[in-house]
Image (spheres, rainbow, N blue to C red):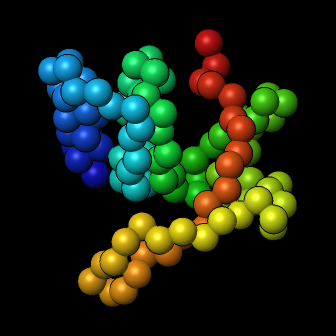
Amino acid sequence: MQVQAALGCELLTDAVDAGVRVDWCTADAVYGRDRGLREECEERGIGYSLGVPCSVRIRLPSKTVVRADATVSMIPARAWQIASCGPGSKGDHRYAWAWLTVSRRPS
């Protein structure tokens, strides 16, 4: 999977370097676990929403570091939105989304 994630980052950087305007990048956990992709988006000012495995460690603005799955209980129920990502071979892909402010990677 790491090869696939690195390829995704390479495709993104090639597109931007070729002059393609990229405001946002979205990807599933295969790509979201790649720190290089997140760093590339941050360095180039590209907004991103990337899936991550539940074991990924996240730094909160308080400097507390928690696993991604631990953040679910920190977000109030009213903050969650359910949205479709489109049809798939097994039906509509519906996901629950919420906004969580995290700190940038430590300097």
Q: Quadrant of residue 6?
A: top left
Q: Is residue 4 visible?
A: yes
Q: State the image coordinates of residue 76 (x, y, percent, origin top left).
A: 84, 61
Left or right of 92, for residue 64: right
Q: State the image coordinates of residue 89 (x, y, percent, origin top left).
A: 27, 83
Q: Quadrant of the C terminus?
A: top right
Vertical comparison of 2 with 106: above or below? below
Q: Residue at x 47, y 47 (%)?
A: 50
Q: Quadrant of residue 38?
A: top left
- In the foreground, 37 or 77: 77
Q: Is residue 35 visible?
A: no
Name the residue furthest top.
107
Q: Residue at x 33, y 31 (%)?
A: 22
Q: Residue at x 33, y 87 (%)?
A: 90
Left or right of 79, for residue 81: left
Q: State the image coordinates of residue 95 (x, y, percent, origin top left).
A: 54, 70
Vertical comparison of 86 with 51: above or below? below
Q: Residue at x 40, y 55 (%)?
A: 28
- In the foreground, 55 or 47: 47
Name the residue furthest bottom.
90
